Image (cartoon, rainbow, N blue to C red):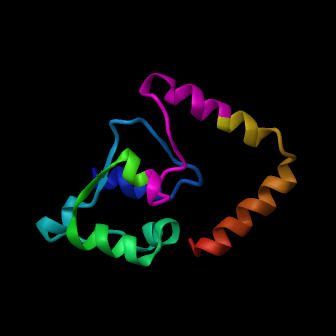
Amino acid sequence: MAGGFDLAAFCDIRIAGPGAAFGHPEIKFGSGVMFGPLAAIAGGATAADLTLTGRTIDANEAHRLGIVSRVVATETLLDEARAIARSIAEAPLPALVRMKEAIIARRGN
């Protein structure tokens, strides 16, 4: 679970199905967790809560906390992801490169 959550935190846009769950349970086993990427998208207080407690949240709470952009029906998840990719691909490449550079600079990763 946690590896997937960390991977999602590095994504620019996150969508989830209603059955998705997010958490960092590895803190309960003494393993380190990735605080920084989560703090960049959800804020330090939320990241501290989730990384220190190891609690699991559902897709709706992840949406409320800004961790995912939207929650869509499982059967439309791939179509929604493709629609987002098509929308992004409509922009000129130089503009996308500049925007991605700004996103990386803001996140610090």
Q: Nearer the viewer, residue 26 or 15?
A: 15
Q: Quadrant of the C terminus?
A: bottom right
Q: Is residue 14 above or below residue 85?
A: below
| Residue 3 part of the magenta-drawn span | no
Which residue is pictured at 41% across the width and 53% down the height?
Answer: 62
Position of 30 compared to 61: left or right? left
Which residue is pictured at 59% across the width and 72% down the height?
Answer: 107
Which residue is pictured at 73% across the width and 66% down the height?
Answer: 101
* Residue 98 occupies quadrant: bottom right
Q: Which residues are magenta?
A: 63-83
User: Where is residue 11 drawn, in percent x and y?
Assistant: 54, 53
Q: In the rendered picture of this protein, how many numbered marks are placed on residues?
A: 0
Q: Is residue 63 above or below residue 71?
A: below
The single residue placed furthest to the left in the displayed view is: 29
The single residue placed furthest to the top in the displayed view is: 75
| Residue 64 part of the magenta-drawn span | yes
User: Where is residue 100 drawn, in percent x and y?
Assistant: 71, 60
Q: Is residue 9 above or below residue 104?
A: above
